[in-house]
Amino acid sequence: QVQLVESGGGLVEAGGSLRLSCAVSGGAFRYYNMHWFRQALGKEREFVAAIRWNGGITYYSDSVKGRFTISRDNTKSTAYLQMNSLKPEDTANYYCATDLEVLGAEIKRPSRYMKYWGKGTLVTVSS
């Protein structure tokens, strides 16, 4: 059973930074593409960022491009989301997820393709 556990959320002022972590256990992390999604109160879950299993390709939503950076450390089975220049509209629960496809080529996948999810970590950005 694959488990994903997010951490690193919290309260930050606009313009500040946070780094989220997603620790993965129970699977072959180094072979899986990893994704970050977020869901604000009263809104649908939306894609944030994705990274290929080898870290070679990343993909971002337009709303975070240039401010957020996704990365991974396969030796630690952990994915990260560095969030800079945070805005109040970034306030949401942030979830990591994987489609569990081994050595998958495609990382531009919507949430319905994800097989495993973490429980989320709350990020609140004050104005």
Image (spheres, rainbow, N blue to C red):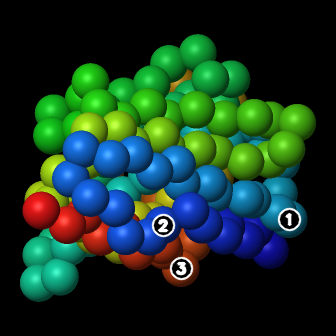
Q: Determine the secondary structure under disc 2.
A: loop
Q: Residue at x 75, y 59 (%)?
A: 24
Q: Which residue is mark 1?
A: 26
Q: Residue at x 20, y 66 (%)?
A: 126
Q: Which residue is mark 3?
A: 119
For mark 2, does the 10 Å Cα neighbourhood hold few (<14), some (14 to 19), or many (20 or more) residues? some
Earlier-in-chain disc, 3 versus 2? 2
- Left/right placement of residue 56 relative to residue 114 reads right
Marks 1 and 3 close (CB-CB < 8 Å) = no
Q: How far across and down, in percent of the image, does residue 14 sit?
A: 21, 53
For mark 1, does the 10 Å Cα neighbourhood hold few (<14), some (14 to 19), or many (20 or more) residues? few
Q: How far across and down, in percent of the image, does residue 93 sit?
A: 35, 72
**Figure label count:** 3
Q: Quadrant of residue 111?
A: bottom left
Q: CA distance from mark 2 to mark 1?
A: 23 Å
Circle 1: residue type:
Gly
Is residue 115 at least partly visible in the picture? no
Is residue 92 at least partly visible in the picture? yes
Q: Which part of the image, by quadrant, shows the C terminus?
A: bottom left
- Left/right placement of residue 1 relative to residue 67 reads right
Q: Which residue is mark 2?
A: 9
- Left/right placement of residue 57 relative to residue 22 reads left
Q: In front: 110, or 21?
A: 21
Q: CA distance from mark 3 to mark 2?
A: 12 Å
Q: Residue at x 60, y 66 (%)?
A: 7
Q: Determine the secondary structure under disc 3.
A: loop
Circle 3: residue type:
Lys
